[in-house]
Image (cartoon, helix red, strand yellow):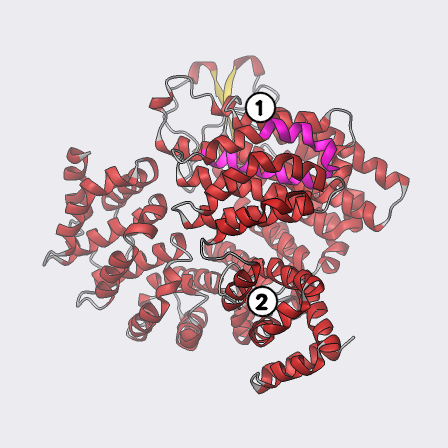
Amino acid sequence: LQPILQVVFPILSAAPPPGEEDPEDEENDTEGFAVQVIDTMALHMPPEKLFNQLLPFTQACLSSENSYERKGGLMCMAVLAEGCADHIRTKMLSSMLQTVCRSLSDKNQVVRSAALFALGQFSEHLQPDVSKFHAELMPLLHGYLSSVNQTKIGHMTKAFYHADTINPYLPTLMETMLSALNNAENLKLKELAVSAIANAAKKMLVPYFPPIIESLKGFLTDTREEMRALQTQALDTLSVLARTVGKEVFSPLAAECVQLGLNLTDAVDDPDLRRCTYSLFSAVSDVSPDCLAPQLTPITTVMLLSLRSTEGVTAHLEEDKQFVLLDDDDADDEGGEGDAVLDEEGETEVDDRDVAGFSVENAYIDEKEDACDALGEIAFNTGVAFQPFLESSFQQVYELRDFPHEDVRRAAFGAMGQFCRAQHKVWKENPTEANHQALHKLLQVVLPCFLEAVRQDRERQVVMAILESMNAVIKSCQEEALQAPGILAEISNTIKDVLKKKTVCQDVGGDEADEDEQQVEYDAMLQEFAGEGIPVLASAVPAETFYPHLNDLLPLIMSKAKSSCTEADRSFSVGTIGETLHSLVDVAGCRVVAGRLSNRLLPVLVAGVKDSDAEVRNNGVFALGALAQAAGPIIASEYPMIISGYNTHFTLFSQVFPALVARLPLKEDMEENKTIYSCLTFLYSHNPVLVVRHLRPIISAAAHLLGMKDVDNETRNTLLMLLRGLAQHHTQEFESAVISLPDEQRNKMTMAVTQS
C-alpha cells in the first residue's frame, strides 16, 4: 500500500498543464485516474488499514502552501466518503467536516471548489449525520455561493445535497440556477443547473416550479444533436420533479410531459434518450396514472422494441477471439462496451457457427434495464388499464432472466415481481375468477423462477434484487403467493441456503480468507435480504403453518447474536427476530407459537437490550415489546425480566411510562410514531388513569404530529382515535391540556377532534 500511495499522491496533487488552470474544470485524466485509485481502495480495503497509511499523506497535502496539494488532499477525503462511510461517520466526521469548512474559505478558488465537491460527497454518502451540522455548513455555503458568478456554476450542483436544510438560502441558489437556465450559452452549464435542480427536488421547490418547467419544455422540443446531453438531463430532472413536487402541482402537466417524451422517442434515435423517457413515463404513472392510460399502446410498443432489440450488439468471430480485460464495472464509461457474452440465440446475420460471442454497448444495456424497471412500475400503477399489455410485457421480460449482463437480469426479475403485484391489485379491485386464475398463473411461473435464480445466479447483487422482489410479492399477495403445494417450504429452504452460504453466488471457489472485503460486505447484505423474508412469510400464513420452518431458521439467525459477532450481525439478528415476532401478532395462532419460542428468545433479546451498540439495543427493545405483544399473558411471568432489560432503575411500569412520554415528540425515525400511538391507545383502553396523569405532554406531542404533512393514514387514524376518546371520556383534562397549546396547534387539534 505504501509504495502505491507514494506514486499516487504526487499525481493527485500536481498542478495542471499550462492553460488548463480553470478551477471549475473537472480533474484532468491523470489526476482522475489517481482519484479512482483512492476510490477503489476505499471500496475494497478495510477502513482502519487504509486510513492508517493514507492519513499522513492527506494531512501533509492539506497543510501545504501549494494550493494544488491542498486540493489533492480534499479530493482524497471526498472519494473516501462512499467506501468508508461507516468508519468516517463514527470516528472522523466532525474533524473532516471542520477541514472542509475551513477550505470553503480558502484564498484560492481551486481549493474552494474542491472543498465544495468534498462537501457534496459527504452530503451524498454520510447522511443523516452530515445534516446535523447544517447550522455550521449552510452559512459558509451561502457565502461561497454569493461570491460565484454564473460561469463558475459547476460545483454548485453539490450544494443541493443539503436539500433538507437549505430553505433559508433557497432564493440565492435558485436565482443562480434559473439565471443559468435562461441566459447561459454554454449547454454544459445548463445541464449542470438542471442536474442541481433535480438534486434539490423537494416540495419546497413548488414556488419555482413554473419557470423550471418552462425551461425544461424548451429543451425537450429542440431536436438538434448538440442538445442530446441536456435533453437526457432534463428528462431525468422532470422525472424527479414529478415524484417530489406533489400530485396537485404536477398532475396538470402530466399529459403534456408524456406527449413530449413520446415525441422525442419518435424524432430521435438515441438509447440514452429513450431510457430517460421510460423513467419519465414511470414517474408520471406514480403521480397521475390516469394520464398515462390513453398512451399505453405507443409507450409499451417502444419499450418492448427496446427489450427485443439487438441494436448495439457486436458479433465476435472465432478468429477474432481476444482476451477480455474489463469486467462489467470497468466498462461503464460512456460510449464503451460491456463484455457480456450472449449465447448463440442472439439474432444476427453472421453464421452462428463462426460466432464466439457478442458484446453490447452499455447505452443499450442501460436502455433494456430502464425499460424493464419502467414496465414493472407502470403495470403496478396503472392497474386494470395495463391488462391488455401484461402478457406480452411479461413474456418479453421473462426472456431476459438469463441475459448475460447482470443489470438487465436484475431489472427483469424486479419487473416480474411488479407484474405479480399488479395482477394481485387488479384481482383485489375486481375479484373475478379470471383475474384470480391469471394471478396464480403468474405466481406459479415467477416464484419458482426466483428460487432457482437465487440458488444459481453467480452475481450477489442480482440475487439481492431477486430476494427483495420476492419479499415484495409475498408482502403484497400474502397467502395467495403461498397456495402452491410445497412453495412455503421451498422459499424457507432457499432462505436457509442463503443464510448457510450454500448458493452459487456465495461460493468463493477457494479459501474464505482470500475473499475480498467487498464480497464479505455483499454476503452480509445478501443475508440481510434473505432474513427480511422471514417476517414477510410469518405475516402471510397462520403461525402454526409457519412454525416448523421458523423453527429451522431461528438457530441460523440467533447464531449471529453472539457477543463475538460484529455489531452489524448482532443488529441483524435481533432486528430480524423482532420483526418476525411483530409479524406474528396479526396472524392466527400467534400467542401459542410466540409463547413456545419465548424461552429460547428471551435471553437473546435481553442481551440485545444491554448491548454496547445503540442500534442493537434499539432493536432489542423493539423485539422484547414485540414478544410481549405476540405472546400476551403466556409470558406475563417474564415481565419483570423484560422491564429490567430496559433499565435497571425501572421496577414498575408506572416508572417506564413517564420516560416514554418525556421523549415525545420523536425527532427522527418518524415511522415509529405508529408504534408509539398504538401503544398509547392500548394503554388508555387498559389503564386510562395512567395516560390521563401525563396528558399534557401527550397532547403536546400529538399536536406536533398533527402539524406534520407526511404522516401515513394509519398513524393519523390511530392518533385521532386516541384523542377523540380522551375528549369524550376525560373532557375537562383534555380541554385543559389543549388550552396550553399555541394558538395554531390548538385550532388544528380542535378541528381534528371535532371532524367526523
- Residue located 45% across and 53% down the image: 648
For this view, does 110 lie left or right of residue 289?
Answer: left
Marking on residue 536: none
Name the amino acid type tagged 2: Val
Residue 555, by quadrant, is top right
What residue would you read off at disc 2? 245
Q: Which percent across, then down, holds residue 280?
A: 60, 55
Above or below, comparing residue 713 to residue 442 in the picture: below
Of 227 and 341, which appears nearest the observer? 341
Outermost residue to the right = 433
Name the amino acid type tagged 1: Arg
For this view, does 470 lie left or right of residue 200?
Answer: right
- Helix, strand or loop status at disc 2: loop
Dominant secondary structure of the residues highlighted in magenta in the image:
helix
Outermost residue to the top = 353
- Helix, strand or loop status at disc 1: helix
What residue would you read off at disc 1? 455
- Extent of the magenta region: 524-553
Of 347 and 529, which appears nearest the observer? 529
Any magenta on residue 526? Answer: yes
Point out the frontmost of discs 1 and 2: 1
Q: Which percent across, then down, holds residue 143?
A: 29, 74
Q: Split into 4 quadrants, where in the image is the N terminus?
A: top left
Q: Which percent across, then down, holds residue 464?
A: 54, 35
